[in-house]
Image: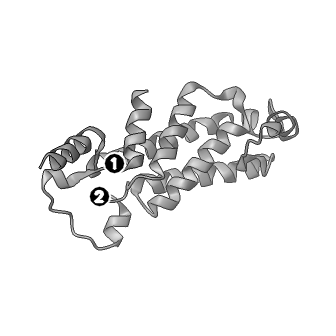
Amino acid sequence: MARLQWRRKITEMFGMDFRSLALLRICLGLSVFYDVLGRTEDLRAHYTDDGLLPRGPAIEYFGRRLWFSVYFVSGEPMGVSLLFATHLLVALLVTIGYRTRLMSVLLWVFQCSVNNRNWLVMHAGDIYVRILLFWCMFLPLAEVASLDAALAHRPPPRRKPADWMYLSGPTTAYLLQICA
């Protein structure tokens, strides 16, 4: 009995509600979408070879630290525009919850990549978003209010309030990371 109460208390402290995880997915996806959309205004100046930090010097300076960026693939405005369009599409797919696990991983890769492409235009919020996206790769973000759940033909869950909670290592790490 004491063990059950202990587990319930731990779940209450470090568990996350599936509905909250869905809201996190939607808000984080929209936030990244808006961030990337804002970055497109200065696309040529900040992310192409015509701008402040061409790929050559960026790779020479930053590459020594083993940083990876898919944005190093092209320095032409058209190529970078295609990468930004893909980044926006992935953020949108995370928001609606389509192939959520895969899209969460891709969104984290794209977000790290856009930050690693030009560290001169970063701010502290970029690091925070990357940390949130990292933990989201391990969370069940698609259980409710997602296209994944709808395509799986799962009826809306009729759960007791305690059954809405999800506890795992990533939920604990996510919450502790925010509190730190």
Between residue 149 and residue 75, name the one nearer to us.
Answer: 149
Could you tell me the amino acid type at mark 1?
Leu
Here the colouring is one colour
**Can residue 89 be seen by looking at this rendering?**
no
For image coordinates 72% across by 46% down, the residue present is 69
**Can residue 39 be seen by looking at this rendering?**
yes
Horizontally, residue 158 falls left or right of residue 134, namely left
Could you tell me the amino acid type at mark 2?
Val
- Position of residue 39 relative to residue 156, above or below, is above
Q: Position of residue 161 (x, y in %)?
A: 14, 51
Q: What residue is disc 1 on?
A: 21
Q: What residue is disc 2 on?
A: 144
Q: Say which quarter of the image contains residue 146.
A: bottom left
In which quadrant is the C terminus drawn? top left
- Position of residue 25 relative to residue 131, above or below, is below
For image coordinates 46% across by 39% down, the residue present is 31
Q: Position of residue 37 (x, y in %)?
A: 56, 41
Label 1 vs label 2: CA separation? 8 Å
Q: Position of residue 16 (x, y in %)?
A: 29, 45
Q: Say which quarter of the image contains residue 6.
A: top left
For image coordinates 15% across by 59% down, the residue present is 159
Count neighbours of disc 2 (C-alpha within 10 A) and say few if under 14, some if 14 to 19, many if 20 or more. Answer: many
- SS at badge 1: helix
Q: Position of residue 103 (x, y in %)?
A: 51, 57
- SS at badge 2: loop
Q: Are marks 1 and 2 in contact (CB under 8 Å)?
A: yes
Comes first in the chain, label 1 or label 2: 1
Between residue 87 and residue 167, name the one nearer to us.
Answer: 167
